[in-house]
Amino acid sequence: MEIREISAQQITDAVKRLFMDCNYYIGKDISCAIQAAKERETLPMAKDVLQQLIDNNKIAAEEQIPICQDTGMAVLFVEYGDKVTVRDGSFKEAVEEGVRRAYIDGYLRKSVVSDPVFDRTNTNDNTPAIIHTEIVEGNTIHITAGGKGFGSENMSAIKMLAPSAGVEGVKKFILEAVAHAGPNPCPPMVVGVGIGGTFEKAAQLAKRATLRPINISNPNEKYAELEKELLEEINKMDIGPAGLGGVTTALGLNIETYPTHIAGLPVAVNICCHACRHKECVI
């Protein structure tokens, strides 16, 4: 396979489009799930909230305005081909410029501050982004992008379980994390779960899980069944749409896993609101 050149401008243009699109257009997996949830609900108020979400998403798409006022912090998962070189700039600079242009030109709210504790000054362009890069074989760049709102991000949790906790301990922690979040993440939510790896890898897996379409189950049959079981249990909590009660607390639950150490069982829960923004492209 030959080395392939990609211009920095191509990357910037692609990233700009991804973040504008994910903020204007809800994914088909989410829109179908909301419609199906509305048909299942029996509480009039729950049905009404879900209809408002359907109407909101339709208006956002038609008028190209944000689905939600919190247009999120830019998060990218990148599969970077080892036969790719970037011309006329660096990959990171090209990505940051794409995010900058999306949030300025697309009239998306800028929510990033320069320092987390002492100098919380807005950067005014929503940069820097969070970029997770994996080097893979090939001559393309596959980018999955999401705008992560913090009403839901703030409800995330991680725990280093002992291996003896087993599957029951894993389930208990996930359900407790969702119950603790309650109405705060703007339900109906999407729950991303990361199991395995190390402390930081579990959190990364959980974030990645929120970007997987909710109509695609984990390829491992045992984890697919666990996804289904946990989703059913969460929807029995009666938190419901907007926290007003009902059988739709979560639209989906995705689990991603990674091998781990013999002495550990890391589990992370990353919660996303109903505006589960994600788009992807291959350059």
Image: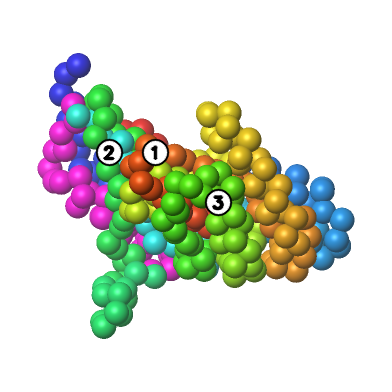
Residue 178 in the image: x percent, y percent?
60, 60
Which residue is label 2 attached to?
134
Q: Residues within 10 Å of mark 1 (few under 14, many from 20)?
A: few
Which label is found at residue 37? none
What span is colored magenta in the figure?
A: 83-110
Q: Residue at x 44, y 39 (%)?
A: 257
Q: Earlier in the sequence, mark 3 or mark 2?
A: 2
**Comparing marks 3 and 2, which lies closer to the viewer?**
3
* Whether residue 184 can be seen here: yes
In whole angstroms, how far apart are the C-alphas of marks 3 and 2? 31 Å
Could you say which quadrant of the image residue 199 lies in?
bottom left
Q: Residue at x 43, y 68 (%)?
A: 109
Residue 140 in the image: x percent, y percent?
28, 29
Which label is found at residue 169? 3
Q: Is residue 85 above or below residue 130?
A: above
Q: Is residue 1 above or below residue 268?
A: above
Q: Earlier in the sequence, mark 2 or mark 1?
A: 2
**Comparing marks 2 and 1, which lies closer to the viewer?**
1
In whole angstroms, how far apart are the C-alphas of marks 2 and 1? 15 Å
Q: Amino acid at mark 1?
A: Tyr
Which label is found at residue 258? 1
Q: Circle 1 — which element?
A: strand
Given the current orientation, which residue lies at the most extreme front position? 164
Q: Circle 2 — which element?
A: strand
Q: In the image, is residue 87 part of the stretch drawn in magenta? A: yes
